[in-house]
Amino acid sequence: MNVRTLLLFALLGCGLPFAEAQQTQRAQRDLQRNRVYKARIVPHWFQNNTRFWYRNNLPGGAREFILVDAEGGVRELAFDHARLAAGLSKAVGTTNYNGDRLPFTLIQFDSETKAVLFKVEDTAWKCDLASYECSKSEDKFDVVAEPDDSPNPPRRRPRSTESADRNSDTSPDGKWTALIKDHNVFLRSKDDASELQLSRDGKEGLAYGRCAWSPDSKTLVTFRVEPGERKEVYLIESSPKAGGRAKLQTRPYALPGDKFTAYEINLFDVASQKQIKPEVDRFEHEWLRPRLHWARDGRRLMYQQTDRGHQRLRVIEIDSHSGNVRNIIDEKSDTFIWTAHTENLGLSLVNWLEKSDELIYVSERDGWRHLYLVDTREGCIKTQITKGDYVVRGIERIDEEQRQIWFRASGKNPQQDRYFVHYYRVNFDGTGLVALTEGNGTHTIDFSPDRKYLIDTWSRVDLPPVNELRRSLDGRLVCKLEEADISELEANGWKPPEVFVAKGRDGTTDIWGIICRPPDFDPKKKYPVIEQIYAGPQGSFVPKSFSSSRRFSSLTDLGFIVVQMDGMGTANRSKAFHDVCWKNLKDAGFPDRILWHRAAAAKYPYYDLTRVGIHGHSAGGQNAAGAVLFHPDLYKAAVASCGCHDNRMDKASWNEQWMGYPVGPQYSECSNIDNAHRLRGKLMLIVGELDTNVPPESTLRFADALIKANKDFDLLVIPGLGHAIGAYGERRRQDFFVRHLLGVEPSDRNVPDPAGKLTQSIPSGGQ
């Protein structure tokens, strides 16, 4: 019984629990994932980083060991596997080993690769590669076990280059301890424990806190803090596992427009006990606090400040002796500067340098995200380091000695998908830009320990991984290593998504997406289409790299075509592309998405524009519901789960970033709740009662507004669940689309079928 049949049995209520079908599907995916070979290189460098070996896992449990001479550009088998197996069999005397299935996974070469060491169970062995005689060894074997070699390893999050505060109560010279008493600042001498009161204007609700010393111990920096509002959200756990009464959960949760904590900077000269209040705006933020960076002279302090509303970013400098203030950076935007929820950006906007009075600044001031060299002593931008119609996607390394930046970017290869990530190196002055990667796909790299070489792994959704060895100096190809083998995957029916590109609302901008078809697809039939949507401006979301999973299989297996695309208003394109979301989250790229659907239907007659559904989660839930409110001519059915249906009711940090501050009429214009009367088509709302991301009342108030507007809809509130829908919610979502897009009524699961047989025909998307 194949996975599709199992899921359909579950869908039609014929005896197989949905959870079991899900487990079967996951197991099938795991098997498929294991059927991809040579997808990833895990190098073991040795001989002064001039050579490395790696292992290929092969079909049928076979494996091979590969040795690469990086200097010579030679890739070859690490040894004669058959001869080693024979030599080991002879030495052991009780077992005949197979060269394709050697009994070890890790090896170690001597310094001149004249012998190879390995362990069989707990015994260390050494094989002479001239004679292939094997003997027990006393040599140290210290090869580290390899990480997961799946084709889709998790990306290591880059280390932030933002400097840390030197916050401490004790002065660097050890003579003083700063303390807060009765809301004010005091100094206690280490010599005689005497105390000096430095401030006298601290009070309840405006007390001092956060002490930081200058490197020379001459100045103490503190902040007078006005707390923000501590407003809470409430969750009701209706069905506690232990039984008894329902439980109330509360937690602080700032909404757009709430009062944030504000920090007023104050300086105290230790020798004179003089207090200085620099003339600078207070630092106001929901969760961040000022992070001080001291210049090398130990006198000037600087910190980054983003004004509420995310339309002004400054790097502020204060002379700790005089209190004089100037802005090293002062960037303003008519829309927004992306400073909150940058987890998908992989960049610190301000990167302090320690060996010079400079910093690396990341800005979109010219319409694209680029790197700038800032002279903090002169207080100006010295050089625009990168420029052009592409976006920097992350800084891998800042090399102050060589004055170079290693970074990744997308869009610089115009003949490729604009979202593909490539790697580069550039000098601080903008010269010497070197492309380290080349292939037509999205890339990850792994440097040799001395960074002279890199292993470049690249793929596309429709191309399995390719592994190459390149020189870091100039990006030149040293040798090809492996191309992933997906023959078993394909033999089991796996097919890649189709990459589909159409023009957006301006008639010129490419909108990139993917199309996934049913496994028994027949181009002579008509198929309903379901779009998965997430249009959160904090990223782009269409997959770009290879995966052995069958994307969207829970829906394609039921006979749907499933698509996904990134419309305008999402990230990783130009600033203008991104700005579409500004104070306009209801847009969600729909004008681009609709044109994309029409272009696909124009090319493929089986693409049924009369049966288009959509589903999304969280911000995608807001988008999915918005589809049947604002664009019902195309979208006929929507499932919105855990949605933020009114941006005034969701976290301040996310919504003020994109919807602006102060809260204005744009919030109502984009509200699904305020626009509930517009509903046409079919809508299902799903929410977990313990959602700690988006408050559940957002969904419930939307339901209330729909009821008041006399609209019909489905509502599923799942007890005990958080920001998710679980297996039950997923099954109900499938039922919803089968009912409203396939026109098939799922069987009543409350009526058991004694015979355990299908009483309904299996729905098929084609007509």
Image: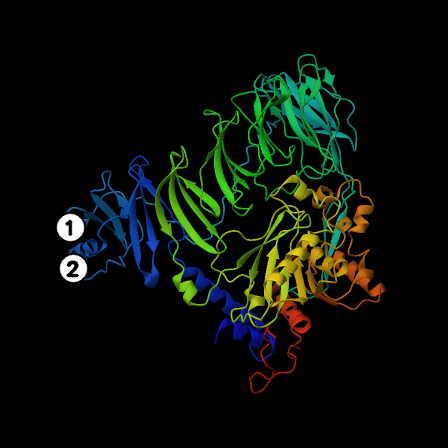
Q: Are marks 1 and 2 in contact (CB under 8 Å)?
A: no
For the residues labelled 1 and 2, the Cα–Cα distance comes to: 13 Å
**Relative to the observer, which residue lies in front, 401 or 541?**
541
**Regarding mark 1 in the picture, which secondary structure is present there?**
loop
How was this image coloured?
A: rainbow
Q: Position of residue 129 (x, y in %)?
A: 19, 47
- Residue at (61% x, 47% y) in the render: 539
Classify 560 as above or below 185.
Answer: below
Looking at the rendered structure, which numbered label has been put on residue 748? none
684 lies left or right of 55 = right
| Residue 435, image x, y percentages | 46, 36
Most extreme residue toward the bottom, as rendered? 755
Using the image as rendered, state which of residue 632 and residue 372 is in the foreground.
Answer: 632
Of residues 97 and 554, the one drawn nearer to the viewer in this rendering:
554
Q: Nearer the viewer, residue 447 or 577?
A: 577
The amino acid beneath tag 2 is Gly
Based on the displayed image, in which of its 4 quarters is residue 140 positioned? Answer: top left
How many other residues sit within 10 Å of disc 2, few (<14), some (14-19) or many (≥20)?
few
Taking 224 as reference, is 68 left or right?
left
Pinpoint residue 697: horizontal percent, then vertical percent: 76, 57
Residue at x-position 63% and y-position 45%: 571
* Quadrant, the C terminus: bottom right
Could you say which disc has been placed on residue 133 in the image? Answer: 1
Q: Is residue 193 visible?
A: no
Classify mark 1: residues with Cα within 10 Å, few (<14), some (14-19) or many (20+): some
Q: Amino acid at mark 1?
A: Glu
Report helix, strand or loop for mark 2: loop
Residue 718, picture quadrant? bottom right
| Residue identified by numbered label 2 | 93
